[in-house]
Image (tube, grey):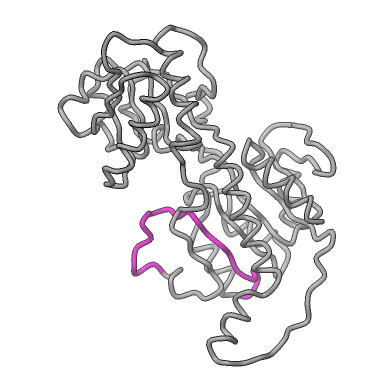
């Protein structure tokens, strides 16, 4: 993209870190030519045609009257869909970065294996200087369900299958996945996976149909002793229902990277439940070095009227 003047991009990442903004600016300058990433809060942002954001303050994007393109700093766009003031005119694109798929698949595998090899039990033993073994459970062909089979979910499913697990991938509509992954879709198959799988991994986007998807009824459908992992969005889980299912002994525990309210409040009961592993929304962090190509391509396309990749369907919410 050769421009006669600097490309000005309104920027907000909800971290408060200016070094991250400068990192993005350096990466995009290498690809677009002279760039200036303007903090979204600054008055200069009002004249920007492009925005690169993550959880921007509600109502702020509507004040950018010349806005042509909004790029989400992650694969999720629920933070934008939740702001009803976001104007209809600008296109919205999301990042589909292979590095994020790689990172999130590692996080899932880490936590699946830590659970299956009794990591919490042995860490507690080590703190008490107890050198005691548990019988190793048989995990070959252990059934695992992955809910949400987009770019990230497919990588997760394939890597879990390569480790010898019996993996089913659930999607909203009918899709066919490479063997040995089993394909599933729709309400009936959702309930069947809940009842048959030992580990449940949520990587779904947040939409009206996935909000509160994992509630008391869903957890009751799961096998006694099942384990739940959420790397999707916190609002897909009725948190009180999950806590009840764990404390009642129906579920063996959970590993959560996302929550209905973030940061997770200090008084939240999850902090007091040893069977719940808490991560601070770090399963897959956007890396400017690997994601800047897509952002630059989106800005170049928007500037010239070319088709946009990873365009969000606003009617579907992702």
Seen from this angle, which residue lies furthest left?
Answer: 43
- Name the main secondary structure of what is drawn in magenta: loop
Q: Is residue 223 above or below residue 275?
A: above
Q: Is residue 282 above or below residue 255?
A: above
* Picture quarter with the N terminus: top left
**Which residue is painted at 56% across and 62% down in the image?**
255
Q: Can residue 38 be found in the magenta stretch?
A: no
Spot occupied by residue 128 in the image (x, y as percentages of width and height): 55, 91
Q: Is residue 192 above or below residue 185?
A: below
Quadrant in which residue 30 is drawn:
top left
Q: Can residue 250 be found in the magenta stretch?
A: yes
| Side of 17 where 165 appears, left or right | right
**Which residue is painted at 31% across and 47% down in the image?**
15
Spot occupied by residue 242 in the image (x, y as percentages of width and height): 55, 63
Quadrant in which residue 149 is drawn:
top right
Which residues make up the magenta segment?
249-268
**Which residue is painted at 17% across and 24% down in the image?**
44
**Which residue is painted at 45% across and 30% down in the image?**
292
Q: Is residue 208 above or below residue 51?
A: below
């Amino acid at each position: 993209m050769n421009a006669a003047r600097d490309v000005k991009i309104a920027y907000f990442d909800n971290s408060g870190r200016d070094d991250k903004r400068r990192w993005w600016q350096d990466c995009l300058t290498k690809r677009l030519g002279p760039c200036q990433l303007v903090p979204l809060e600054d008055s200069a942002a009002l004249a920007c045609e492009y925005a690169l954001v993550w959880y921007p303050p509600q109502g702020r994007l509507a004040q950018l009257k010349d806005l042509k393109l909004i790029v989400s700093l992650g694969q999720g766009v629920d933070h934008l869909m939740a702001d009803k003031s976001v104007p209809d005119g600008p296109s919205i694109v999301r990042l589909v970065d292979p590095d994020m798929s790689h990172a999130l698949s590692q996080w899932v595998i880490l936590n699946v294996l830590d659970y299956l090899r009794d990591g919490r039990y042995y860490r507690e033993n080590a703190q008490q200087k107890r050198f005691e073994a548990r019988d190793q459970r048989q995990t070959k062909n252990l059934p695992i369900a992955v809910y949400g089979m987009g770019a990230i979910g497919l990588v997760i499913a394939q890597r879990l299958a390569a480790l010898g697990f019996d993996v089913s991938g659930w999607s909203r509509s009918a899709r066919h996945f490479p063997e040995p992954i089993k394909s599933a879709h729709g309400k009936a198959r959702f309930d069947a996976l809940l009842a048959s799988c030992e580990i449940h991994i949520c990587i779904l986007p947040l939409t009206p149909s996935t909000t509160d998807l994992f509630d008391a009824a869903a957890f009751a459908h799961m096998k006694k002793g099942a384990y739940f992992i959420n790397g999707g969005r916190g609002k897909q889980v009725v948190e009180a229902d999950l806590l009840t299912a764990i404390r009642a002994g129906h579920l063996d525990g959970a590993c959560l990277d996302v929550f209905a309210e973030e940061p997770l409040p200090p008084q939240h009961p999850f902090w007091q439940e040893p069977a719940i592993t808490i991560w601070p929304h770090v399963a897959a962090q956007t890396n400017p070095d690997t994601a800047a190509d897509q952002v630059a391509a989106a800005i170049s396309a928007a500037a010239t009227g070319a088709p946009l990749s990873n365009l969000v369907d606003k009617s579907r919410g992702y």
